[in-house]
């Protein structure tokens, strides 16, 4: 994403806890900073992409955080996947300092980030969205204004619930077919032109069939997103029966040592129980 912001002609100051990430940014033409505060000082906009709501809060509100700058940035664009309630709280804190915040989680994985074709789901005031749009267009192709602050993260939860459930459902169905002796490639080709199709099926089952467990989106990250969705559903008073069952399967995958593998590897749990593999 940083690469595409620079390619779009913007000047970039950056900070990351990873020295490797900082080195890659510098090679692209970005300027290295020693803290989130330094990277944010007096900027037109700050984009953050972080792992958990707790880390987002630390980076925005901490002593070396974005809002500790003497001249706070005009706008904060939070690309992380988090809790709507946290986004609302941070947006209020930003307003007190004279800054605006939108939550703008993304979907599309590393490939979409590299190509600048991410889907971006934005929650915030319309005028702030309009100001953020030129920057967001440098990283994404499908950009949606969902509603007020927090609604972007709520929309991302809807997406992640479907993504996580689709993978588990595909695994169960394909295991049954494999047990019946149907070739994995045949099942894939049939489903791709039938009503059982989903993007998760297309991308993750294709990866699973090759035996490739290299992480595009890890079990740990999927479990984090499903935990956030469960927490939000509890806040909203919405029962999530299928989500909670699905979440336990990802918990089992993590407990089996698969946390750092791609989330498609939840299939190996059922493969082990049944004694078949979904492979070409």
Image: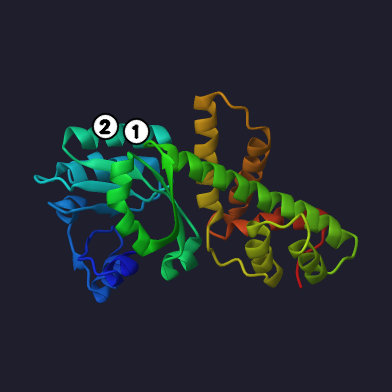
Q: Could you tell whether 159 is left or right of 63 in the image?
A: right
Query: Can you say whether 37 is above or below 95 in the image?
Result: below
Neighbor class of circle 2 (other Cα within 10 Å; few <14, some 14-19, many 20+) is some
* Quarter the C terminus occupies: bottom right
* Quarter the N terminus occupies: bottom left
Pointer 2 residue: 92
Label 1 close to label 2 by CB (< 8 Å): yes
Q: Could you tell whether 113 is left or right of 41 in the image?
A: right
Q: Looking at this rendering, what residue extends furthest in the right direction?
A: 180
Q: Name which residue lies at 16% across and 38% down.
A: 98
What kind of element bears circle 2? helix
Q: Is residue 189 visible?
A: yes
Q: Position of residue 124 (x, y in %)?
A: 35, 40
Q: Name which residue lies at 29% across and 69% down.
A: 8
Q: Could you tell whether 113 is left or right of 162 in the image?
A: left
Pointer 1 residue: 88
Neighbor class of circle 1 (other Cα within 10 Å; few <14, some 14-19, many 20+) is many
Q: Name which residue lies at 36% across and 35% down.
A: 86
Q: Position of residue 125 (x, y in %)?
A: 32, 39
Q: Could you tell whether 148 is left or right of 7 in the image?
A: right
Query: Can you say whether 169 is above or below 242 in the image?
Result: below
């Amino acid at each position: 994403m940083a690469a595409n912001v620079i390619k779009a002609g913007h000047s970039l100051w950056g900070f990351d806890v990873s020295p490797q990430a900082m080195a890659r940014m510098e090679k692209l033409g970005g300027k290295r900073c020693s803290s989130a505060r330094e990277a944010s000082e007096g900027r037109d906009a700050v984009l953050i992409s972080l792992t958990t709501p707790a880390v987002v809060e630390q980076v925005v509100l901490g002593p070396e955080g974005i809002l500790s700058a003497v001249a706070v940035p005009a706008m904060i664009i939070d690309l992380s996947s988090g809790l709507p309630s946290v986004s609302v709280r941070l947006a209020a804190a930003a307003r007190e300092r004279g800054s605006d915040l939108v939550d703008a989680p993304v979907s599309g994985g590393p490939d979409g980030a590299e190509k600048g074709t991410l889907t971006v789901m934005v929650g915030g005031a319309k005028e702030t969205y309009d100001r953020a749009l030129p920057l967001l267009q440098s990283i994404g192709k499908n950009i949606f204004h969902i509603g007020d602050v927090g609604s972007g993260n709520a929309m991302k939860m809807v997406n992640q619930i479907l993504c996580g459930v689709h993978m588990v459902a595909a695994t169960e169905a394909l295991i049954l077919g494999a047990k019946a002796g149907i070739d994995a490639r045949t099942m894939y080709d049939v489903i791709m032109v039938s009503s059982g199709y989903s993007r998760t099926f297309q991308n993750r089952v294709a990866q699973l069939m090759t035996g490739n467990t290299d992480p595009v989106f890890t079990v740990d990250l999927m479990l984090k997103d499903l935990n956030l969705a469960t927490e939000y559903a509890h806040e909203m008073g919405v029962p999530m029966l299928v989500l909670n069952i699905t979440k336990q399967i990802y918990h089992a995958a993590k407990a089996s040592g698969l946390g750092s593998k791609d989330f498609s590897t939840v299939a190996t749990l059922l493969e082990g129980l049944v004694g078949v593999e979904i492979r070409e």
